[in-house]
Image (tube, rainbow, N blue to C red):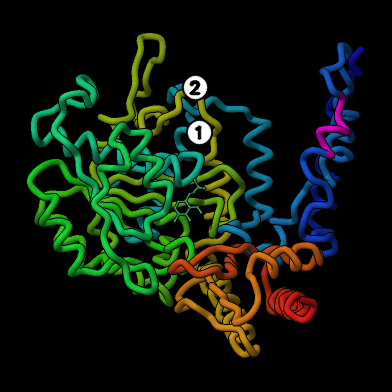
Amino acid sequence: MLETDDWAALDVARDHAIRYLKDLDARPVDARSGPAEIVAAAPPALPNGGEAAEAVVRELVDLFDPGLVASAGGRFYGWVTGGTYPAGIAADWLTSAWDQLSGPGPASPAANAADVIVGRWLVELLGLPDGAMTGLVTGTQMANFTALAAGRNAQLAKVGWDVERRGLAGAPPVRVVAGRERHVTIDTALRYLGLGTDSVVPVDCDGQGRIVPAAFGDAIAAAAGGPLLVCLAAGNVNTGSFDPFAELIPVARAAGAWTHIDGAFGLWAAASPTTRHLTTGVDLADSWALDAHKWLNAPYDNAAVIVRDPDALLAAMSTNADYLTPNETTVDPLAKVPEMSRRARGFAFYAVLRHLGRAGVADLVDRTGAMARLFADRLGALPGVRIVNDVVINQVLVEFADADPAAVAAAVRASGEAFVTPSKWAGRPVLRISVSGWRTDAGDVDRTVGAIEGALRSR
Ligand SMILES: Cc1ncc(COP(=O)(O)O)c(C=O)c1O
């Protein structure tokens, strides 16, 4: 029998959430339990009887709390993981409570409008071309896929091939020029799109992961003459480096290519006067992908695909059926993204952008960048420790003369003090530190450097 006052569950969740966020700094950063222990502690089969909502929330907390990682806190530096601003969390709660269907426009004028407003703000904030169209998707994987679908459509249309109708069998081959250090989600997108990873013409990169212009020119010359996609990066996932857009994109354009920029986190550098120079020329591209859940510190899952030519995006994504009754004044959310029914993620995106304002986004980029440089200064001063990359934004790569980065990362995580991860750069093992959370301050850097020193001492 269910209890009637299930609304109390919301109060319990709110109280727990606020306590969790306030106590975040005091808890060990890594989880205390692994998934197998949590699975073992849960009912093995779904019980026949239901449970009151409030009790379910309490059970959720008891069962899953040991497996939580304090990634929303100031000492989590794994992958590229932002925290969440309270404004974003609150908007996310409202998104669930409002439970809007963000698909056919009339299903929620509010959700439809949030997408439009966020899109307009992004284009302006990042200095992208007026009139570019934005769709909100789950992450940059999906944004890369969506943008390259639009590019595939447009490039094949230019040679008279309607890929939406005819598919790829028998189509002229599409080549993809991309740096050797491209993010793996570009390859995944090409697989999803039926282009296959063999379509890539890989281009050599320099020691920071930036495409070498001369090699790019050669690759374009070799691949030109048919449908051509070019993938560039704003923010290499390891080094944080940026391809030289102003040099490369005119070459791609002259060859008639569609240029896409994977800017999952790095594109936010365009929002700060301090780092904007790194993105010079991004506005020349045809499409862009960026996450809100990484460096902007919006809640998961939230990202944007932006396409210069709205018709190309709509041709690749839009869908219709008699029962959908499209909106007459704005483009329906479902016309711009792969999903049909979809969370109204524009509300949380709106809330974080509105909370920060232009100056706040710039400050976030600058502050986290300053903390990354502090890491580089502090760690680089230790004996046997070398900083491998130019710290241009929020990424730091660390090499040890006589320690295995994976073992150092494991020891730091086990200490509960911080969360760092190993990677490889130029084939060599490195420790990777990504300062993406809004909470990280000099005290956090201090504690993390202490934990790394401790790990090095105790080998
Ligand atoms: C450069 C780059 N591109 C794409 C992605 C994939 O983004 P998401 O995990 O949001 O799909 C990442 C994730 O770290 C990234 O750093």
Amino acid type at image mark 1: Ala
- Dot 2 crowding, Cα within 10 Å, few <14, some 14–19, many 20+: some
Residue 42: in magenta span: yes
452 displayed left or right of 193: right
Identify the residue at horizontal 41%, vertical 9% (top origin). 323
340 displayed left or right of 284: right
Q: Is residue 363 above or below residue 160?
A: below
Residue 76: in magenta span: no
Q: Quadrant of the C terminus?
A: bottom right
Q: Secondary structure at mark 2?
A: helix
Q: What is the magenta range?
A: 37-43
- Dot 1 crowding, Cα within 10 Å, few <14, some 14–19, many 20+: many
Quadrant assignment, res 356: bottom right
Whether the residues at callouts 2 and 1 have beta carbons within 8 Å, the answer is: yes
Identify the residue at horizontal 79%, vertical 52% (top origin). 31
The one nearer the camera, 272 or 356, is 272
Residue 180, given in percent of the width and then of the height, sits at: 33, 59
The one nearer the camera, 82 or 46, is 46
Q: Is mark 2 within 8 Å of ligand 1?
A: no
Q: Is residue 131 visible?
A: no
Amino acid type at image mark 2: Ala
Q: Secondary structure at mark 1?
A: helix
The one nearer the camera, 459 or 189, is 459
Residue 24, given in percent of the width and then of the height, sits at: 80, 59
What residue is shown with label 1?
A: 111
Q: Is residue 348 above or below residue 106?
A: below
Identify the residue at horizontal 37%, vertical 71% (top origin). 276
What residue is shown with label 2?
A: 107
172 displayed left or right of 404: left
Q: Quadrant of the N terminus?
A: top right
